[in-house]
Image: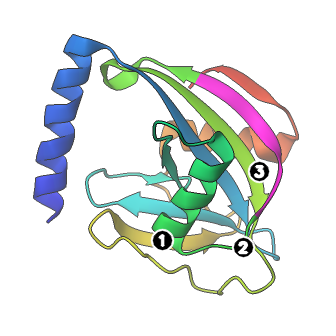
Amino acid sequence: MAWTHRLVGKAARTVWRITKPRTVGVRAVLLDRDGRIALVRHTYMDHWYLPGGGVKKGESIDAALFREMAEEVGVTDARIERVLGVYHSRREGKDDHIVIFVAHAGPDASAELRRTDLAEIAEAGWFAPEELPASLSPATARRIAEYRQGVTGHGAW
């Protein structure tokens, strides 16, 4: 299954280089009651990322965030604290804007994150900020550092 996601992703990136679409994405620095951060590793990419994804046409940004958290890690009772920052990326050939939120999982959040989309999510877990996986994506590492420093981020992804 992972190889089909990788092929589809490669084809999409080729189309994006030609059409250069404008997209909007969301991600969350999602925290549990112990201050651990939720991270996911996709089946079609090699690094760990903050949970999130694209905003669908007609969908609000906050609705997209709640949908993505439910789809990727099974958290359905999160509360948004604030916007961490808004970033711009031209990587992958898209004109992409990414809104990062700081959110808190509800008191009933499981000690173990539940991968609800097994075709997309290879692994999901809670990580203490000082014990992040070595294969964290560089942009994810920057967003977590901004969160820990208490700064509002912006600019390049």
Q: As drawn, which residue projects farthest toward the front? A: 58
How far separated are the C-alphas under marks 1 and 2?
A: 17 Å
Q: Quadrant of residue 132?
A: bottom right
The spot of residue 115 in percent (x, y) is 44, 76
Q: Which secondary structure lies at badge 3?
A: strand
Residue drawn 73% across and 67% down? 78
Residue nearest the viewer, comparing 120 with 122: 120
Instruction: State how many labels appear.
Output: 3
Residue type marked 3: Val
Residue type marked 2: Asp
Q: Nearer the viewer, mark 1 or mark 2?
A: 2
Mark 1 or mark 3, earlier in chain:
3
Magenta residues span: 79-87
Please give left or right for residue 29 compared with residue 20 in the image: right
**CB-based contact (under 8 Å), mark 1 and mark 3:** no
Query: Which quadrant does the N terminus fall into?
Result: bottom left
Which residue is disc 3 drawn over?
102
| Magenta-colored stretch includes residue 136 | no
Q: Which secondary structure lies at badge 2?
A: loop
How crowded pointer 3 is (Cα within 10 Å; few <14, some 14-19, many 20+) is rated as some
Residue drawn 54% across and 75% down? 74
The spot of residue 24 in percent (x, y) is 52, 30
Q: Quadrant of residue 33?
A: bottom right
Q: Which mark is residue 79?
A: none
Rendered view: 91 above or below 41? above
Which residue is disc 2 drawn over?
77
The spot of residue 73 in percent (x, y) is 52, 71
